[in-house]
């Protein structure tokens, strides 16, 4: 049985993304790029939700009340800088810069992402308040849940600059894709091609499964 997909130029990026998984994205990226684009070992208060959208970024830095006073370096200020170019459907990427075991936020701070209709959050650090975050209309992936405030360790430092998460570069505007198996970052200029190719990977794999179902074990 042949599996067909609709013409990718006639579909939205969101429709193309809904039919694929992180593994399919990586297979497609491998045909176009040689750089590392995938991230593993995320957990989620909203398991089963797919995260997809263009990135806006907040980078964290070691806290210092003298060098980085809270009036200038705080989540509220950096969040609104990050979404100056638009909020709805964006993915808020929080770069912990090595502080993966520290809280980068919780339900109160991230309620701003809910209020401004972002697609969700990808945090290279821990988050608080999973029981509250699961009720938000967001797809959220992070390094784990924590209960301790992290403001004495790190502070939001700058918005919408290129960041690195686990060896993967994320530039503002790049597309972030995440599901239960991991996350991938797609260069903005290639997102439609990558998604269309990932859909072809899905179709090809489905066709292979159908052929395997009826294959003759005695035929080379």
Image: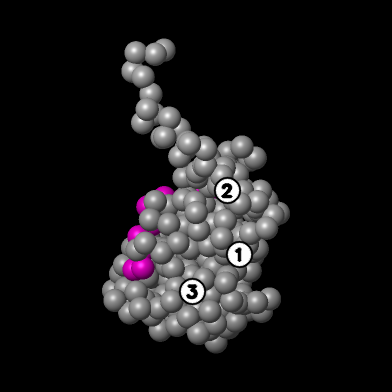
Image coords of residue 198 (percent x, y)? 56, 46
- The residue sitting at 39% across, 51% down in the picture is 181
Q: Which of 133 and 191 is in front in this view?
A: 191
Q: In this view, does 110 lie to the left or right of 33?
A: left
Q: Give the range drawn in magenta.
A: 37-46
Q: Mark 3 points at which residue?
A: 155
Give the foreground label among 1 and 2. 2
- Tell me whether circle 1 and circle 3 mark residues in contact (CB < 8 Å): no
Label drawn at residue 5: 2
Q: Name the residue under label 1.
A: 54
- Crowd rating for badge 2 (residues with CA inside 10 Å; few <14, some 14–19, many 20+): few
Image coords of residue 173 (percent x, y)? 65, 63
Total numbered labels placed on residues in the image: 3
Q: How far apart are marks 1 and 3 (CA)?
A: 23 Å
- Tell me whether circle 1 and circle 2 mark residues in contact (CB < 8 Å): no
What is the residue that sits farthest to the bottom in this orientation? 71
């Amino acid at each position: 049985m042949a599996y067909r997909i609709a013409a990718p130029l006639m579909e939205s990026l969101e429709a193309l993304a809904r039919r694929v998984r992180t593994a399919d994205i990586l297979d497609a990226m491998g045909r176009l790029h040689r750089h590392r684009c995938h991230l593993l070992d995320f957990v989620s208060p909203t398991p089963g939700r797919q995260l997809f959208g263009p990135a806006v970024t907040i980078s964290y830095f070691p806290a210092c009340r003298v060098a980085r006073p809270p009036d200038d370096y705080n989540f509220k200020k950096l969040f609104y800088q990050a979404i100056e170019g638009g909020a709805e459907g964006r993915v808020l990427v929080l770069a912990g810069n090595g502080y993966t075991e520290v809280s980068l936020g919780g339900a109160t701070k991230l309620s701003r992402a809910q209020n401004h209709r972002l697609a969700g959050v990808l945090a290279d650090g821990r988050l608080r308040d999973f029981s509250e975050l699961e009720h938000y209309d967001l797809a959220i992936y992070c390094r784990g849940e924590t209960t301790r405030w992290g403001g004495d360790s790190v502070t939001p430092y700058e918005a919408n600059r290129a960041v690195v998460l686990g060896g993967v570069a994320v530039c503002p505007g790049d597309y972030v894709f995440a599901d239960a198996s991991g996350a991938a970052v797609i260069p903005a200029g290639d997102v439609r091609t990558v998604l269309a190719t990932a859909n072809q990977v899905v179709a090809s794999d489905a066709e292979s499964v159908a052929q395997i179902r009826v294959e003759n074990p005695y035929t080379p």
